[in-house]
């Protein structure tokens, strides 16, 4: 099993680094040639250059059904299409889409994306689980602080 | 599943005539094609709305255009599109220049809002299966133009480019 990280921003860079640190096989797909060089210089991982919403690019990645596919792309539409392509064309079951618009979390999951994540959505749910201000600060408390 | 086979030029193709869609026709993207098609449908007496993220693009509509126009910030925002009437439309034509935005709007329209007729424009015909497998029709202007150019040029007669 490997994780394919589609995206080349700082979030994608951080995620790829964390996954490699915990000994996962990682393939990065970067749209920008400049960012692809940054990734390749920093990490001992397979780094591909190209648009992860295009079929010939994902053909080169050689996606397998057991891979985990994570899309961190600048527009929610791009993330949706990358995940849809991974699922429909290569049978990838675990597609994860990081979205900007929190409303797309439920919409994308009902459209067949395995998991959609938004930071605002996660925060709202974390706060929503707190019934008192003390609970809320406990949930948001850093473990090291 | 996609099969990766080479396919012919994409256009909306059906077995037999399709009944004319009822109700509102929503056109997403006031591109040259979107504006021209909206103007034509409006002139034919259909209820038409045009949704764009660029106010100046509405200048592409004919002066006689009778339909509604909406300017929204993000053409991939489901809530904003719903407020333009897409969820209750009889047909949605997603004619933006971005393939991925058209694919998302088409999936929302067909699969979430159950719009009976949904057509999306693509530049990259490799993505057609991502729509057709879900009952969404595809129009690929580049392939249609290429086919016409081959015919006009005579190149295809000797099988040179076919």
Image (cartoon, coloured by chain):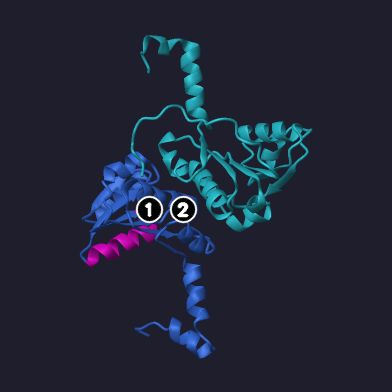
Is B153 placed left or right of B36 in the picture?
A: left
Which chain can be seen in cyan?
A: B
Q: Disc 1 or 2, which lies upstream in sequence?
A: 1
Q: Secondary structure at mark 2?
A: loop
* Tag 1 and tag 2, C-beta contact below 8 Å: no
Left or right for A83, reference A127: left
Q: Quadrant of the N terminus of chain B?
A: top left
Dot label at residue A7: 1
Residue A7 shows in this picture: yes
Residue A99 seen from this side: no
Question: Which range of residues does the magenta coloring cover?
Answer: A6-22
Residue located 71% across and 33% down the image: B39
Q: Position of residue A6 (x, y in %)?
A: 35, 52
- Which chain is mark 2 on? A
Which residue: 44% across, 35% down? B124
Q: Secondary structure at mark 1?
A: loop
Q: Quadrant of the C terminus of chain B?
A: top left
Compared with A132, A128 (above or below) is above
In which image quadrant can residue B51 be found? top right
Percent position of residue A144, x then y: 34, 83
The chain displayed blue equals A
In this rendering, the answer to whether B81 lies above or below B37 is below
A2 is within the stretch colored magenta: no
Main SS category, magenta section: helix
Q: Is residue A11 above or below residue B55?
A: below
The answer to whether residue B27 is above or below residue B84 is above
A85 or B134: nearer the viewer: B134
Instruction: Between residue B11 and residue B147, name the one nearer to us.
Output: B11
A19 inside magenta stretch = yes
In the drawing, does residue A111 fall left or right of residue B63?
A: left
Residue placed furthest toward the front:
B16
């Amino acid at each position: 099993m490997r994780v394919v990280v589609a995206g080349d921003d700082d979030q994608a860079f951080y995620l790829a680094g964390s996954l490699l640190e915990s000994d996962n096989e990682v393939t990065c797909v970067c749209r920008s040639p400049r960012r692809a060089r940054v990734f390749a210089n920093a990490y001992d991982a397979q780094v591909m250059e190209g648009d992860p919403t295009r079929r010939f690019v994902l053909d080169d990645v050689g996606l397998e059904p057991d891979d985990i596919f994570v899309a961190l792309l600048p527009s929610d539409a791009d993330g949706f299409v990358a995940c849809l392509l991974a699922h429909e064309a290569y049978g990838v079951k675990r597609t994860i889409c990081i979205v900007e618009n929190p409303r797309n979390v439920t919409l994308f999951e009902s459209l067949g994306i395995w998991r959609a994540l938004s930071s605002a959505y996660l925060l709202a749910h974390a706060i929503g689980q707190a019934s008192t201000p003390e609970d809320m600060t406990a949930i948001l408390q850093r473990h090291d602080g | 599943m996609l099969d990766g086979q080479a396919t012919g030029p994409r256009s909306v193709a059906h077995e037999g005539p399709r009944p004319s869609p009822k109700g509102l026709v929503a056109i997403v993207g006031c591109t040259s094609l979107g504006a021209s098609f909206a103007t034509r449908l409006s002139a034919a007496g259909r209820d038409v709305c045009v949704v764009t993220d660029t106010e100046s693009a509405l200048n592409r509509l004919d002066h006689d255009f009778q339909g509604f126009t909406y300017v929204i910030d993000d053409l991939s925002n489901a809530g904003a599109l719903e407020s333009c009437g897409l969820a209750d439309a009889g047909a949605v034509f997603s004619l933006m220049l971005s393939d991925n935005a058209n694919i998302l709007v088409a999936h929302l329209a067909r699969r979430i809002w159950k719009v009976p007729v949904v057509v999306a424009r693509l530049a990259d015909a490799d993505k057609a299966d991502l729509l057709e497998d879900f009952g969404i029709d595809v129009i690929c202007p580049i392939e249609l133009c290429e086919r016409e150019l081959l015919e006009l040029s005579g190149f295809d007669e000797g099988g040179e480019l076919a």
